[in-house]
Image (cartoon, grey):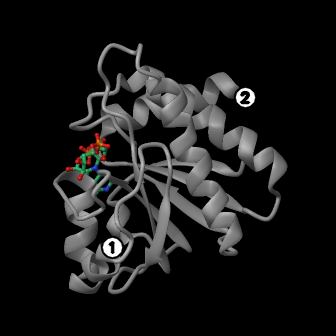
Amino acid sequence: MSRIEIIQGDITKQAVDAIVNAANTSLLGGGGVDGAIHRAAGPELLAECRTLHGCRTGEAKLTKGYCLPARYVIHTPGPVWHSGDRGEEALLASCYRSCLTLAAEHGCETVDFPSISTGVYHFPLEKASRIAIATIADFLAEHPEIKRVRMVCFDARTKAYYDEALEELT
Ligand code: AR6
């Protein structure tokens, strides 16, 4: 699937139509990529997030990007990994689908994702990377209007797992 790319980098620096935030259900900020996005976007992002009244795990909500180079931020709370028997895999797939659905509805052609749930939420990276790539590929097959989706991995280890998952697909 040539419309999927994996890069290593900082998602807050990407000039794309939409970046995805690995948020929590409050949508009021936190650590990790969520903290980085709020810091780079500025306080207006938090002000808009306050009007959204949170978001359920596996769903997504869209805001403007404010001081970010990206036009929109799509916020999705990923599942916290427990032991895999609380629907974590289906919820993670739902995060990717919900974000891409919103992106398509808002005319986004380029979308960048961080590795949802694999930081403080402890989703196993190998499983998470396979779910992410398979879900994105399925969505893109039905949505030619989205031109490119990238996984923006913060570190080399994370990137290696997504590279592998993409290779397995092709
Ligand atoms: N660009 C790209 N990826 C990043 C960046 C960045 N600037 N910073 C961190 N990452 P995490 P989660 C990577 O913990 O597991 C927050 O407190 C990071 O290395 O940010 O979904 C929220 O408010 C890792 O690979 O998200 C929630 O409470 C990936 O992003 C909770 O954390 C995800 O790690 C969500 O936990």
Q: From the image, which quarter does the C terminus lie in?
A: top right
Of the numbered discs 1 and 2, the one sitting upstream in the chain is: 1
Q: Is residue 95 above or below residue 55?
A: above
Residue 127 rendering spot, x and y as whole percentages: 46, 21
Amino acid type of disc 1?
Answer: Cys
Residue 146 rendering spot, x and y as whole percentages: 73, 62
Residue at the outermost front position: 53
Residue at 37% x, 61% y is 11
Spatial separation of the CA atoms under disc 1 and disc 2: 38 Å
Q: Quadrant of residue 33?
A: bottom left
Residue 49 got which mark? 1
Label 1 sits on a secondary structure element that is helix
Q: Nearer the viewer, residue 125 or 29?
A: 29
Q: Is residue 147 above or below residue 94?
A: below
Residue at the outermost left position: 31
Q: Nearer the viewer, residue 48 or 167?
A: 48
Q: Is residue 80 left or right of residue 161?
A: left
Q: From the image, which quarter does the N terminus lie in?
A: top right
Tell me if I can see residue 38 in this picture: yes
